[in-house]
Image: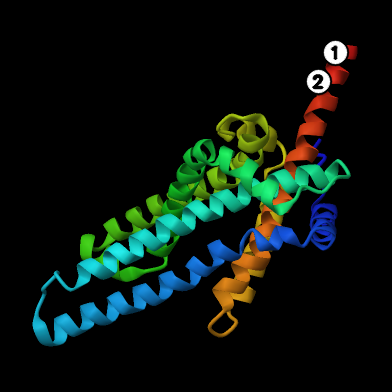
Amino acid sequence: MSKLKIIGTIKRSFDLLKKDPTLIVLFILPAIFSLLSPRIIAYLSSLVFSMIMWDGPELAPLVPALILLITSFVIGFFFKVWASAGAILKVTELEKGHKLGLKEALSKGLKKVPKLLVPAIISLAISVLTIASLATVYTDYPLSLLLMGPSVIVLRVAVGCLFIVGLYLVVRLRLYAPACVLENNFGLKTSWKLVKGSWWRLFAIVLIFFAMSGLISQAWVIGPFLSDVIVGPFSVTAMTLVYFQLREAESSGEERKESL
């Protein structure tokens, strides 16, 4: 029986953010990079359009913008992983009744980044594949270029199955960050084990944050920035609390088995 509390987790996450607002500060720098990428992509799109319309398919003008886009993404991703590690450490201390200073959280969090990057990249790859498969299912153009007739239906079903598998994996591995930071391992195996029996409840929590992010992102100009600054720490806090709940439930279950 799952011990994961959906409403209680959301409420407790909000309470911890009010108790220690510096959790939000950790995500300001990563959020800045979330503002850069769309603008670089828009610039790249305008370059491609101008080359097609006027200059022909010359790739040289695209190189600087592509380098800037990749660099921005890599740096932003690094800072986001670092912020997540620091936030997990701060939440852990808050649950113990203590406050971890911002400087100390960043210092200790930085030491966790090298190991945390591995599962973070794996999780990102699965997420991108899942989103890409969903986009392919609902977009006729790429499929019509590859296949025609019944083959399109077969491919659509296959890609739809890929989306379902990807979504299952994303949720099942969602606790990799707190597991990695607090247990000093990659966290993927731990997350897989803990989420067993609690997939739907964790999915509901993830869906809530996804909806929040989507709504906040609609804000003009600074939507993506606000989404990362608000939903980012909120989500990491909630996942850390979920980790604690499921760890406690697992320990209680093992103790009951031993008593029998």
In the image, residue 211 lies at what x, y percent?
A: 65, 67
Residue 207 lies in quadrant? bottom right
Element carrying mark 2: helix
> Is residue 88 toward the left or the right of residue 36 in the image?
right
Labels 1 & 2 near each other (Cβ < 8 A): yes
What kind of colouring is applied to the model shown?
rainbow
Residue 4 visible in the picture: no
Say which residue appears at 67% left-offset and 63% top-offset.
Answer: 25
Quadrant the N terminus occupies = top right
Q: How many marks?
A: 2
- Looking at numbered disc 2 in the image, what kind of residue is underneath it? Glu
Quadrant the C terminus occupies = top right
- Between 100 and 97, which is closer to the camera in this rendering? 100
Element carrying mark 1: helix
- Between 221 and 11, which is closer to the camera in this rendering? 221
- Between 238 and 131, which is closer to the camera in this rendering? 238
Disc 2: which residue: 254
Residue at the farthest front position: 103
Query: Vertical placement of 174 versus 231: above or below?
Result: above
Q: How far apart are marks 1 and 2 (CA)?
A: 6 Å
Which class describes the residues within 10 Å of circle 2: few (<14), some (14-19), or many (20+)?
few
In the image, residue 74 lies at what x, y percent?
A: 41, 55
In the image, residue 66 lies at what x, y percent?
A: 28, 65
Which class describes the residues within 10 Å of circle 1: few (<14), some (14-19), or many (20+)?
few
Residue 208: numbered disc: none
Say which residue appears at 21% left-offset and 71% top-offset.
Answer: 62
Say which residue appears at 39% left-offset and 53% top-offset.
Answer: 159
> Is residue 241 toward the left or the right of residue 170 in the image?
right
In the image, residue 220 lies at what x, y percent?
A: 56, 85
- Looking at numbered disc 1 in the image, what kind of residue is underneath it? Glu
Disc 1: which residue: 258
